[in-house]
Structure formats: C-alpha cells, structure tokens
C-alpha cells in the first residue's frame, strides 16, 4: 500500500494503549487498517512471548511508516502500446512498551 494511506492510519494510533488501538483499527473505514491491525496483533504476540510483556498494560510507543520499493508493472493499452503502473510499497514499524515500566523510567530521570 502507499505510504500516505498507511500514515493516515498510523497517525491515529501512535501513543495509544493496546486495547484502544484495536478498537480504533476495527472501526476505521480505511482499507489500510486491516493489515495494520494484523501487524499490531503480531507485535503484541511477539512482545508477550519474547519479552514477557502483558498485553493489557502495553501501549504503542513508536509507530512509523517508511517508503519501500516501487513495483513496476505494464498495463496494455490501445494499438499495442503499454503504460507503466507504479505500485508503491511501505515498511511499517510498531514498537510496544509497558506502561508501568515507562512511567518508572520517567520518574528516575
């Protein structure tokens, strides 16, 4: 998907809690929200399995969308000609953190 379409969704969920993010993504009318919803599910599963974080206490600390490679395709047109189609891709990064640990770190500074 396009970087701009993904950023429109990512900007809405940055800094929110995990449960609130799931509710927002399920109710958003954009097609980009479903792949991002799957990505948030995957990030939460990785955080709970690898780091031992509780999903209920986690929030999205970092969410960014970077541009990827362009897939170049040709569309056949009249008289044997072809027009190029550029299909954009993007790289989405989501980082989850624990609320209690982040608040403790803020007070220690």
Image: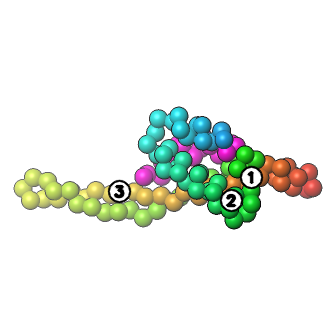
Rounded to the nearest angstrom, the CA distance separating label 3 from label 2 is: 32 Å
Please tell me which residue is depicted at 55% across the width and 40% down the height of the picture: 25
| Residue positioned most to the right | 108
* Residue located beneath label 3 in the image: 87
Dot 1 alpha-carbon crowd within 10 angstroms: few under 14, some 14 to 19, many 20 or more: some
Residue 85: which numbered mark, if any? none
Above/below status of 31 relative to 46 = above
Residue 7 visible in the shown view: no
* Residue located beneath label 1 in the image: 54
* Spot occupied by residue 94 in the image (x, y as percentages of width and height): 62, 55
* Spot occupied by residue 6 in the image (x, y as percentages of width and height): 50, 48
Residue 47: which numbered mark, if any? 2
Above/below status of 86 relative to 18 = below
Marks 1,3: beta carbons within 8 A = no
Please tell me which residue is depicted at 63% across the width and 57% down the height of the picture: 45
Question: Image quadrant for the C terminus?
Answer: bottom right
The secondary structure making up most of the magenta span is helix
Circle 2 — which element?
Answer: helix
**Closer to the eye: label 1 or 3:** 1
Circle 3 — which element?
Answer: strand
For the residue pair 64 and 55, the one nearer the viewer reads as 55
Rounded to the nearest angstrom, the CA distance separating label 1 from label 3 is: 38 Å
Which tag, 3 or 2, sits closer to the chain's start?
2
Q: Is residue 84 left or right of residue 18?
A: left
Above/below status of 71 relative to 10 = below
Dot 2 alpha-carbon crowd within 10 angstroms: few under 14, some 14 to 19, many 20 or more: some
- Is residue 34 one of those drawn in magenta? no
Quadrant of the rendered structure where residue 65 is? bottom right
- Is residue 7 one of those drawn in magenta? yes
**Closer to the eye: label 3 or 2:** 2
* Spot occupied by residue 31 in the image (x, y as percentages of width and height): 43, 42
**Segment colored magenta:** 1-18
């Amino acid at each position: 998907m396009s970087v701009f379409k993904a950023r429109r969704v990512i900007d809405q969920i940055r800094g929110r809690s995990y449960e609130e993010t799931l509710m927002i993504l399920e109710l958003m009318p954009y097609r980009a929200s479903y792949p991002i919803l799957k990505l948030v599910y995957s990030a939460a599963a990785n955080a709970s399995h690898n780091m031992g974080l509780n999903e209920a206490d986690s929030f999205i600390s970092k969410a960014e969308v970077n541009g990827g490679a362009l897939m170049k395709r040709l569309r056949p047109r009249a008289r044997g000609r072809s027009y190029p189609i550029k299909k954009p891709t993007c790289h989405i990064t989501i980082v989850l953190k624990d609320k209690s640990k982040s608040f403790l770190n803020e007070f220690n500074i």
